[in-house]
Amino acid sequence: MREALLYERLRGGLVRCNLCERRCLISDGGRGFCGVRVNRGGTLYTLTYGNLSAVESRPIEIKPFFHFWPGSTALTFSSWSCNFRCPWCQNWHLSRTLPDEVRGLDIPPGELVELAVRQGDEGICVSFNEPTLLFEYSVEAFGEAKKRGLYTTYVSNGYMTLEALKALREAGLDGLKVDVKGGEAEYRRFNNARADVVWRNAREAKAMGVHVEVVYLVVTGATDSDDLIRETVERHLKELGPEVPIHFTRYYPAYRYHEPPTPVEKLERAYELARREGVLFPYIGNVPGHPYENTYCPSCGELLLKRYGPILVESRLAEGRKCPKCGAEVPVRGPVVAKKPRWW
């Protein structure tokens, strides 16, 4: 165990965890909602530091980040458990496992970064399960990554506190992909959480200079109503603006949720609604080969970044990240990396 960051000691041996917005009050011997932070004699410890559930080089587009270092790869790693309880979780074997139930990979942050450098990855990414639960390790790994010139990213449900978000930014966080899981009613129903927190963090991250992209998983019978999709598009424009990408991703049955996969036509309607409302870069996800996973110039419609699933097949961006046809600037963070993943 390692002493956690972001907590406060209270009377009677209680501690308050300030890592995520649940801000759990934890008695001596108890754990927070996520199960990875434990109170021992009035000191809060994390059980995930140096206990990794997976380490793998992955294309940045698979996160998905479509406007951040296109074509690059990130050494992606994860821990255990989650502070949400989505019944359709794709990675439930990680998010429903506590760190003291299994021993994963023990890799110090410096060695992890050296592995990324040796493999030729351009960055590192905390993903697979909720990355906030690997907070202390992330802060150290980000510092090491910056020393070696690597970018740093989080794939998150966005439910961290502002204190945690600011600390991650100070440690070097470059990119944040935020999963939006419906409106207020859906957050309460499935996760006993608040949608406002997620949108606040996405907005604040952008204001801090972090690259932000949003994913909306269109879950059959849960988050797929036309009114809810419209509400999400409107909130996206209000909080983040038209240039921030939003991905409408296809759901597949998993874990404890077995409704049919999202019809592709539903995703297409969401994409087209977003375009009509003013979103410049909507996308469809989990439908490899669909034309709506490509990046088009919002001014003239020219194809700029062609993809097949998580693979950047071709870039037609001109120098200065401009459309070669009309000269419009396209917001892309970092260079376009012309390489294919090793497994392709």
Image: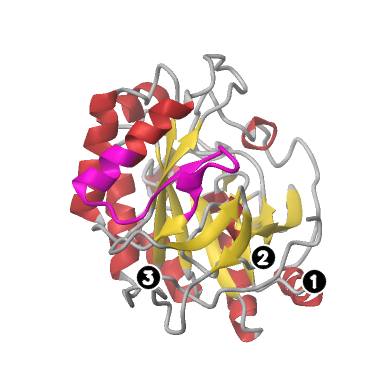
Disc 3 target residue: 331
Identify the image quadrant of residue 38: top right
| In the displayed structure image, the side of residue 133 where residue 190 appears, left or right | left
Q: Secondary structure at mark 3?
A: loop
Q: Would you call the spot at circle 1 few (<14 residues within 10 Å), some (14-19), or many (20 or more)? A: some
* 302 w.r.t. 105: above or below: below
Residue 225 spot, x, y in % from top left: 31, 22
* 111 w.r.t. 223: above or below: below
Q: Which amino acid does the dot numbered 2 rest on?
A: Thr
Identify the image quadrant of residue 89: top right
Residue lying at 50% horizontally and 29% vertically, measured from the top left: 85
Residue 192 spot, x, y in % from top left: 37, 28
Q: What separation in Å lies between label 1 and label 3 (alpha carbons)?
A: 28 Å
Q: Quick check: is 124 in the magenta stretch? A: no
Residue 210 is labelled as: none
Magenta stretch in the rendered image: 272-294
Residue lying at 51% horizontally and 42% vertically, measured from the top left: 285
Identify the image quadrant of residue 268: top left
Q: Which amino acid does the dot numbered 3 rest on?
A: Pro
Disc 1 target residue: 119
Q: What separation in Å lies between label 3 and label 2 (alpha carbons)?
A: 19 Å
